Image: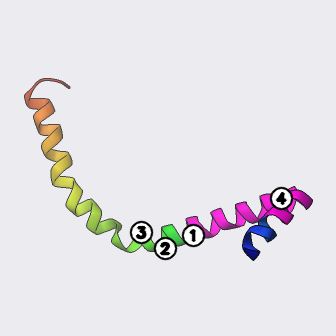
Amino acid sequence: MEQVKIAETLKENNAKTTATFAVMMALIFMATFIVTVFPIAPTLIILASPAILMNVGWLLFARAI
């Protein structure tokens, strides 16, 4: 309940602080996301490339491109 009260107080008293906090949390989330996804990106590319090539092949075969 205390967290809700703090959030309401911030919202009522200082909109700039709330906006700064939201931007800071977004930046932390993006940094964490990039650090987490970066090591597995090559694996995802290797796994996705056959499917992409097959889709392009079928589109060429059907003369859609």
> Which residue is tagged 3?
37
Q: Is residue 4 left or right of residue 57?
A: right
The CA distance from mark 3 to mark 2 is: 6 Å
Q: N-terminal of the two: label 1 or label 3? A: 1
Q: Is residue 12 above or below residue 52?
A: below
Q: Residues within 10 Å of mark 4 (few under 14, many from 20)?
A: some
Q: Is residue 30 left or right of residue 62?
A: right
- Residue drawn where x is 35% and y is 66% of the image: 41
Could you say whether the residue bearing mark 2 is in a helix, strand or loop? Answer: helix
Q: Amino acid at mark 3?
A: Val
Q: Earlier in the sequence, mark 4 or mark 2?
A: 4
Tell whether position 27 is magenta: yes
Q: Is residue 58 above or below residue 9?
A: above
Task: Name the quarter where the N terminus is drawn.
Answer: bottom right
Q: Quadrant of residue 47?
A: bottom left
State the image quarter where residue 30 is shown: bottom right
Q: Tag 4, which secondary structure?
A: helix
Dot 1 corresponds to which residue? 31
Q: Position of residue 39 (x, y in %)?
A: 38, 74
Indicate the quadrant containing the C terminus: top left, top right, bottom left or bottom right: top left
Q: Which residue is mark 2?
A: 35
- Region rendered in magenta: 8-31
Q: Residue at x 44, y 73 (%)?
A: 36
Residue 63, numbered label: none
The amino acid pointed to by label 1 is Ala
In the image, taking residue 14 as reference, residue 39 lies left or right, namely: left
- Between discs 4 and 1, the one toward the N terminus: 4
Disc 4 to disc 2, C-alpha distance: 31 Å
